[in-house]
Image: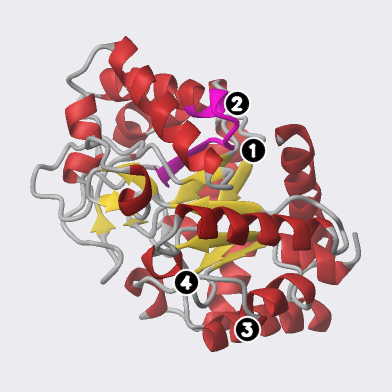
Amino acid sequence: MDLRSAIGQMTLVSFPGDSWNQGIEELLRKYLVGGIIHFRENIPESRDDLIVLNKRIRDEALSTPPGLIPFITVDEEGGRVSRLKKIIGAFPTQEELGKKSHEELAANYVSLGSKVAELGFNTTWAPVFDINTNPENPVIGDRSFGAEAKMVSEKCSIALRALRSARLFTTAKHFPGHGDTFIDSHISLPVQDTLIETILERELSPFRRGVEDGIDFIMTAHILFEKVDDKFPVTFSRKFLREILRDGMRYEGLIITDDLNMGAVKENYTLEERILLSVDAGADVLLLRDSHEGVVKFLETFYALAESGDLKKERIFESAERIRRVKERGL
């Protein structure tokens, strides 16, 4: 993989429209992006049209160097976070599923995963691994299986196995846990005074189980835990991504940022800083939702930082190789 291909593999971006167009073609052929994320505006009315679109995305990526499958992804959790409801129907919230038997839970995710995979996706950003420890949390709530770490860990593990059986890459969000915050990181930066002992014992319990289960992706949270790293939010924190996740938890899969255009980071860091800090901290894949012009600016900025030497080439190739391994063993 050359430098441009390696950088492309490290990006997972939104795209314009709900059918094949010049913008998607540019992202795949010129910028060699390694992954795509669909939002509601990208879902056509017809199930068949969505299948055709995703097949075209896959085929274009495979026919363009380095010839790896693209991550074709969607937020399909069930409940209120559902991009595909009009095509696959409604699925229950994780809170509802937390009250079901293990057999019912597994059946739910086998069904959800199969329906998602039939549409040409290979990744859904589910389940949510956050423990709903703060009932006033504005962003997690019924997206979590519950408030008890052991139960959440067990339910997440069952969901992962079911989704993997549907031939999807497996994911966990939002590391190390967004369930105890009072602020929605889509809007502003949550600052928490949670002790490291509490994070290690409680919040990280589901993620630790996910690592044992061989999870493919762990998505970072844009939260500043001031008693652990008083300078950087988790997405930009070497303490969290390298010391705790890579070294402490022995995680070998992919670290992906949450959307780098969310208010928590966009209002505090320039685009260049968001790219530099996340890569330096240890992120393998950078996620961005924006207009097509904004996505292109992000990609051009990423390439410029690498070509200037501001980003270390060995760091880029380290992530690109990890991405290649996951893609080649995956599907």
Residue depicted at 44% across the width and 59% down the height: 46
Q: Amino acid at mark 1?
A: Gly
Circles 2 and 3: CB distance less than 8 Å? no
Eyeballing the image, is 80 above or below 159?
below
Label 3 vs 4, first from the N-terminus = 4
Label 2 vs 4, first from the N-terminus = 2
Task: Indicate the secondary structure of the residue bearing disc 2.
Answer: loop
Circles 2 and 1: CB distance less than 8 Å? yes
Color scheme of the displayed model? secondary structure
Q: Amino acid at mark 4?
A: Arg
Pick the residue in front: 211 or 44: 44
Which residue lies under the disc numbered 3?
A: 296
Residue depicted at 69% across the width and 54% down the height: 70
Q: Bounds of the magenta span?
A: 163-174
Task: Indicate the secondary structure of the residue bearing disc 1.
Answer: loop
Residue depicted at 59% across the width and 53% down the height: 72
Which residue lies under the disc numbered 2?
A: 214
